[in-house]
Image (cartoon, rainbow, N blue to C red):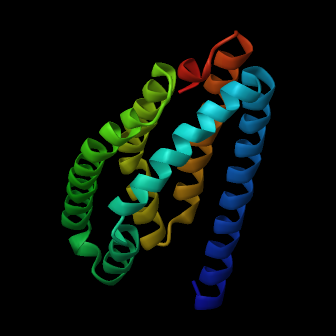
């Protein structure tokens, strides 16, 4: 396949991924705000914002590095992925061990602390999914990356929506 066709194909897949991601996120946010109300939605977004802020310190540009190195030397992919997962897990555990006590210092309810802990767990679990998507992109197989993302987001909307419609709280949602 020519370079122009490859670029056009991959750009199309990446654009589709972004559109699908935003669409599913929009649907989920509509369900969350409708069923959790102002306070529940505020707690939910606070937990994600707090964890998002601290998780930013664990990236170290790792995804960019893994993407670039796999694209250059595909035979090193397994070792790079293993090392990246190990580094991310260790860095998150170290950062979490400092962040959770900080969260306990804020005058928050036990429910918010539990939400923060659940979001931290979610972030640990999503490490593999994010790295797998990066590997597919490095191998220029964006159709698999979009498929995995669509399944991930689709299941989030399906199960999250079902939990909310059945009267679940932010904790149930997570």
Q: Nearer the viewer, residue 152 or 13?
A: 152
At 40% from the left and 38% from the top, the residue drawn is 103
At 40% from the left and 74% from the top, the residue drawn is 64
Q: Nearer the viewer, residue 48 or 20?
A: 48
Q: Nearer the viewer, residue 54 or 21?
A: 54
Q: Is residue 3 left or right of residue 139?
A: right
Q: Is residue 164 left or right of residue 149?
A: right
The quarter of the displayed image where residue 125 is located: top left
Horizontal and vertical percent position of residue 99: 34, 45
Answer above or below: position of 11 versus 136. below
Answer above or below: position of 32 versus 136. above
Answer above or below: position of 15 versus 148. below
Which residue extends farthest bottom?
3
Horizontal and vertical percent position of residue 34: 81, 26
One can see residue 128 in this view? yes
One can see residue 139 in this view? no
Horizontal and vertical percent position of residue 110: 45, 20
Q: Nearer the viewer, residue 173 or 16?
A: 173
At 69% from the left and 10% from the top, the residue drawn is 167
At 27% from the left and 46% from the top, the residue drawn is 98
């Amino acid at each position: 396949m020519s370079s122009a066709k490859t670029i056009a194909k991959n750009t199309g897949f990446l654009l589709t991924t972004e559109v699908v991601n935003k669409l599913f996120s929009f649907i989920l946010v509509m369900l969350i705000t409708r069923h959790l109300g102002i306070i529940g939605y505020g707690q939910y977004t606070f937990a994600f914002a707090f964890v998002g802020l601290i998780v930013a310190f664990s990236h170290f540009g790792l995804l960019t590095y893994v993407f670039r190195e796999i694209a250059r030397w595909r035979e090193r992919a397994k070792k790079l992925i293993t090392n990246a997962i190990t580094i991310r897990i260790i860095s998150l555990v170290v950062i979490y061990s400092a962040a959770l006590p900080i969260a306990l210092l804020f005058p928050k309810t036990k429910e918010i602390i539990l939400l923060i802990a659940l979001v931290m767990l979610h972030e640990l679990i999503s490490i593999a999914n994010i790295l797998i998507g990066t590997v597919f992109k490095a191998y220029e197989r964006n159709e698999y990356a979009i498929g995995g993302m669509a399944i991930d987001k689709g299941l989030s909307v399906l199960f999250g929506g079902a939990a909310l419609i059945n009267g679940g709280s932010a904790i149930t949602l997570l």
